[in-house]
Amino acid sequence: MEIRWLEAFIAVAEELHFGRAAQRLRIAQSPLSQTIRRLEASVGADLFERNTRSVALTPAGSALLPMAYRVIQDLALATAAARAASGAVHGTVRIGFSGAFNHLTLPVLARTVRRELPDIDLQLVSRVRTGDGLVKLRNGTLDIAFVGLPITAEGVASRLIARTELGAALPVDHPLADEASISAAQLADDDFLSMPMDGSSSMAEALMRCCIAAGFRPRVTQEITDPYIMLTLVAAGLGVSVIAEDLAPIMPRGARWVRFHDEPQYMLHGIAWMTDEQSAAVSAVLGLSEKILPTPAD
């Protein structure tokens, strides 16, 4: 009897459908059926009742299932113990990021993890705005998320990793595009492009905060979910926006970042994670992040 036979058996027992079990195991249905037949031959009993409409466990299958779980669990514990004794950190860490806003922070973190923690399977999930990241952290589909700060979410911890000044994103033919600096109040009559204003984007909240500090509420004519597309539409002349200075180097042709000479407003970039018990892999990545993405001094 082989471990993979038991893994196939558990998949069919949980799905009660050979097609779905095959998809879950990422194999074709025919090899899966052959594996189950080998297992049945090994134990000397039918494990499933099959017909054209349904699959059900036989009494022998029902008796085997808890034992199969036990074997798989014992194997996982043995593997974890061996890995711990070796001193290497293994596991999977899923990191959510928004794309353009993390072009300076995510690459350096990912490269360092792959170099210094090679046994960690790093899975990167794109197009994750702050609100999405908090939801995914709490439902367990992410381990770490790049977010805008501050955040208020029960059970979620966060740390500041960058503080960048806000300025204007203008089309190059805008009357103020060639100025060395402007006041945000000078944009009060412009149409604004923004990330979603539904509370899911910290960049949208920063835009609103900056404009209100300048004495006006922006007239947002279009909300865009992708930050680079938003900047592309600025370059196309469809409006202006307020963005952090760290996006200035990747502005599309036809758009320009212009500093505000008002009281500075900042975009606060951070990482967030759940405060409950973490895997060794997540703890290792968080520890490494403190070295390569330290909290900036006030």
Image (cartoon, rainbow, N blue to C red):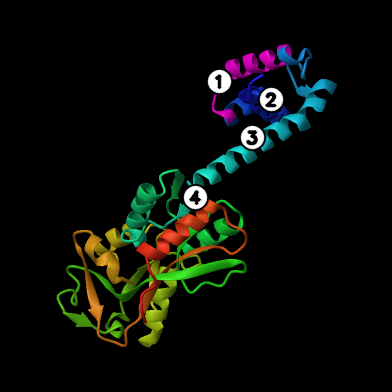
The total of numbered circles placed on residues is 4
Residue at mark 1: 28
Residue at position x 77%, y 32% in the image: 66
The segment highlighted magenta reads 25-41
Residue at mark 3: 75
Q: Earlier in the sequence, mark 4 or mark 3?
A: 3
Q: Quadrant of the C terminus?
A: bottom left
Name the secondary structure under disc 1: loop
**Residue sitting nearer the eye, 75 or 219:** 75
Q: Amino acid at mark 4?
A: Val
Separation of disc 4 and disc 3 at Cα? 21 Å
Q: Earlier in the sequence, mark 4 or mark 2?
A: 2
The nearer-to-camera label among 3 and 2 is 3
Label 2: how many Cα within 10 Å (few below 14, some 14–19, many 20+): many
Label 1: how many Cα within 10 Å (few below 14, some 14–19, many 20+): few
Q: How far across and down, in percent of the image, does residue 255 sit?
A: 22, 65
The single residue placed furthest to the right in the displayed view is 59
Q: Earlier in the sequence, mark 4 or mark 1?
A: 1
Separation of disc 4 and disc 2 at Cα? 28 Å
Residue at mark 4: 93
The nearer-to-camera label among 2 and 1 is 2
Residue at position x 47%, y 68% in the image: 197
Q: Amino acid at mark 1?
A: Ala
In the figure, is residue 137 to the left or right of 241?
right
The single residue placed furthest to the front in the displayed view is 85
Q: Quadrant of the N terminus?
A: top right
Residue at mark 2: 9
Separation of disc 1 and disc 3 at Cα? 25 Å
